[in-house]
Image (spheres, grey):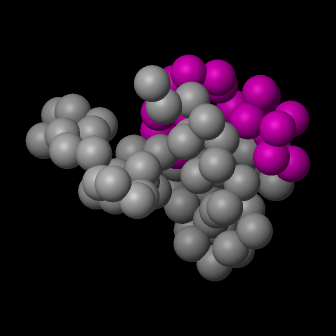
């Protein structure tokens, strides 16, 4: 499954998209510095790895929500 969105779900634009895909896409588009400026968390500013970001975002609902909202705002 190479496409980000094979079928749009009528109510949830994130349906079928993993958190890893979201973070990887945002890093590719913006880079760690811009992500750290928009969502001020340590894993985006200092310990910049996908794995550390996933670990933190899975445990911190407010940060995950902000990252998901940022991703959804950029969907075509």
Q: Is residue 18 above or below residue 22?
A: below
Left or right of residue 32: residue 9? left
Decide if residue 4 is in sight here: yes
Number of dots carrying numbers: 0
* Percent x, y of residue 24: 47, 38
In the depicted structure, whether residue 29 falls above or below residue 67: above
Locate the N terminus by quadrant. top left
Give whichever of 31, 4 is nearer the camera: 4
Q: Report x, y in % for residue 62.
A: 75, 68
Q: Is residue 56 above or below residue 9?
A: below
Residue 62 forms part of the magenta stretch: no
Q: Quadrant of residue 36?
A: top right
Residue at position x 61%, y 36% in the image: 73
State the predominant SS element of the stretch in magenta.
helix
Instruction: Name the spot of residue 43 as percent of width and height, x first.
Output: 72, 53
Q: Position of residue 35 (x, y in %)?
A: 73, 35
Residue nearer the viewer, 6 or 41: 6
Residue at coordinates 72% horizontally, 54% vertically from top-left? 66
Picture residue at 54% right of the left edge, 61% below the top: 54
- 47 or 15, nearer to the observer: 15
| Extreme-front residue of the structure | 10
Q: Nearer the viewer, residue 11 or 19?
A: 11
Q: Where is residue 44, by image quadrant? A: top right
- Residue extending farthest to the left is 1
Q: Is residue 52 above or below residue 67?
A: below
Quarter of the image with the C terminus is: top left
**Region of the chain picked out in magenta, as a range:** 23-40
Residue 20 placement, left or right of 5? right
- Residue in view at x 80 percent, y 46 percent: 39
Left of 20 or right of it: where is 64?
right
Question: Can residue 46 be seen in the rendering of this structure?
Answer: no
């Amino acid at each position: 499954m190479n496409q980000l969105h094979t079928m749009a779900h009528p109510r949830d634009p994130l349906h079928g998209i993993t958190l890893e895909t979201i973070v990887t896409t945002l890093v590719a588009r913006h880079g760690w510095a811009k992500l750290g400026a928009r969502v001020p968390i340590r894993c985006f500013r200092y310990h910049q790895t996908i794995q550390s970001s996933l670990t933190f975002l899975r445990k911190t609902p407010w940060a995950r929500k902000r990252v998901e909202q940022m991703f959804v705002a950029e969907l075509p």
